[in-house]
Image: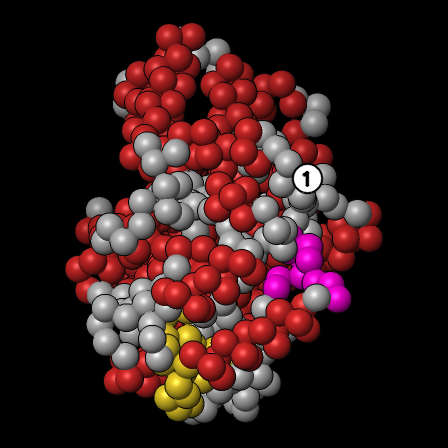
Amino acid sequence: MFRLVKLKNKKDFIFFVFVAAFFIFFIFQVSMMVFYRESWVDELMHLFKSMSVFSGDFVPFKDIIVEYPPLYLAVFGIFQYLFGPSLYVGRIVTACFYALILFLMFLVARKFAGKWWALSGVVFMSSNFLLVGNYASAGFYSLAVLPLMLAVWIETLQIQRWRKSVFCGISFGFMMLARTNMLPAILVYIVYLFFLKINARDIFIFLFFVILTLVLGYFPIVLGDPALAIAYIFAPFHNFGPLKNLPPSTIIGLSFSGFLEIFTAFLKEYYSFLLLFISSVAAVVYQNWRNKNEFLKKESFYVFLVVLSLVFIVTHYCYWRLKGNVYYANYFMPIIVLAAVIGLARFLRKEVCFVVIFAGIVILNFAINIYRTDVLSSPLEETDIQRVERGARFIKNNTEESSRILSFDNSIYHIFTAGRKTYAPLINRNFLYFPVADTETVKRLRFYNFEMLKQWFVEDADYVALQKESWRDMFVRTDHWGGGGKRDDEKINEIYKILGEQYEFIGSELNVYPRKYTDGNDGGTLLLYKHVK
């Protein structure tokens, strides 16, 4: 008996050593992503908008559109209100959410696969640096996946069914308040409940709390303009109301060649995850085909994870309405890893080849990802955020705290980081430029056109910040809402004329933009002009 206890303690100690080693690695890896992850304008826009709305500068749908569900406004807004505008703040918040996602993954996997396989799954998740980098950036990935994983964990608890319905309903509601593209999870979960023959009352309780959470979450931002807000809420599914005559952007519609290109990129990036998932599922199906009905009943939770993974893949990469993106996998990769690990541990652990293949894939993934220069800036160089902060200091030193600065290019990075204000549509950079002459319609949509931009130039702006090398090309976003014609040169010349007649050139700062928007370490000059009123 003494020997058995002693052996168990040794095993626990060894496991503790591995967990501690992974924890140290995790802190190092996430810190690298927070400080050295290359930046793109989307994370800046989420932070800028949330800070502006939370601090009361703009009212949703009255002054500014909220094109995504509103949870990020509260989450990012609260922390920026406490610590000030900063890309680091947003990244640290989402990195903490990512840590919670891994913890919930571990708890679920441990219940069905044991602690060693659970730890292996968490390590596997950390082996793709793009995946980790995206979870640690100031985006929606961690924000949307955390409530999904919380609901999955709640489903494994031994509590009364009605309590599960309440807690899962709230969790799924928060998931939808983070991203509408997570809707398939709710639909698959409802089918799962019907398959388990759950009481109709408990299913109703689940739906009630999903809807209640959504109503309470959307209510504060709908008040500004209910018709416009509701139209934007349902825009991912169908344009109606004020948006019914809006021309489709280039993210709408999926050609076959476009589908192949995007799906190939998805396979190339996540081949290891997909290989393990598909091969393990295929092996489990082959082993249990003869007694499939009994297997479906006995292993319903595993089947739920498999079906949810497949539905997520189809809806995110084979959906005809929206063009996919390799980043969309961030919304469901933890589910795929869970399904693969549980499948390996419960049904294939005696198949030594699968265990060896799994270990080899994890090691290979780490080896390949060490050289991901597309994810991390070199620690020996000035990071993207440090470049931006240097440009922000330049703006801060040459403007007043109450200044309103006009910019429709990547200079909004510096306006945000310097704690200055801009015009509501310009927080989205040039994404909301709408090249039509009907200004009232444009204002109704909370977009902007050239007439509005010119009015801001001439009458309102205190300063203008421009990226020297690219502002002319970014003047209209020709690849989003259309536009770009013979009069573009005339409009650009008109801007030059306004700058020459009504603005004083303050100065410039070199190489202050994220490398994604410059030519490596060169280029990216910030120009600052002061309005002489």
At 26% across and 85% down in the image, what residue appears? 397
**Residue found at the very far right of the displayed protein:** 257
Q: Is the magenta stretch mostly helix, strand or loop?
A: loop
Image height check: is 257 above or below 388?
above
Image height check: is 413 above or below 134?
below
Residue 254 is covered by the magenta coloring: no
Residue 479 is covered by the magenta coloring: yes
In the image, residue 59 lies at what x, y percent? 31, 45
**Mark 1 is on which residue type?**
Arg
Which region of the structure is painted magenta?
A: 476-486
Asked which quadrant contains residue 169, the reply is top left
Assign a secondary structure to mark 1: loop
**Residue found at the very far left of the displayed protein:** 82
In the image, residue 205 lies at what x, y percent? 35, 15
Asked which quadrant contains residue 415, the reply is bottom left
At 63% across and 55% down in the image, what residue appears? 435
Q: Which of 103 and 362 is in front in this view?
A: 103
Asked which quadrant contains residue 245, the reply is top right
At 39% across and 34% down in the image, what residue appears? 225
Q: Nearer the viewer, residue 276 or 461?
A: 461
Residue 81 horizontal side relative to residue 64, left or right: left
Which residue carries the number 1 mark? Answer: 321
Residue 388 horizontal side relative to residue 334, left or right: left
At 54% across and 91% down in the image, what residue appears? 522
In the image, residue 307 lies at what x, y percent? 59, 33
Q: Quadrant of the C terminus?
A: bottom left
In the image, residue 177 lies at what x, y percent? 39, 38
Label 1 neighbour load within 10 Å: few <14, some 14-19, many 20+: some
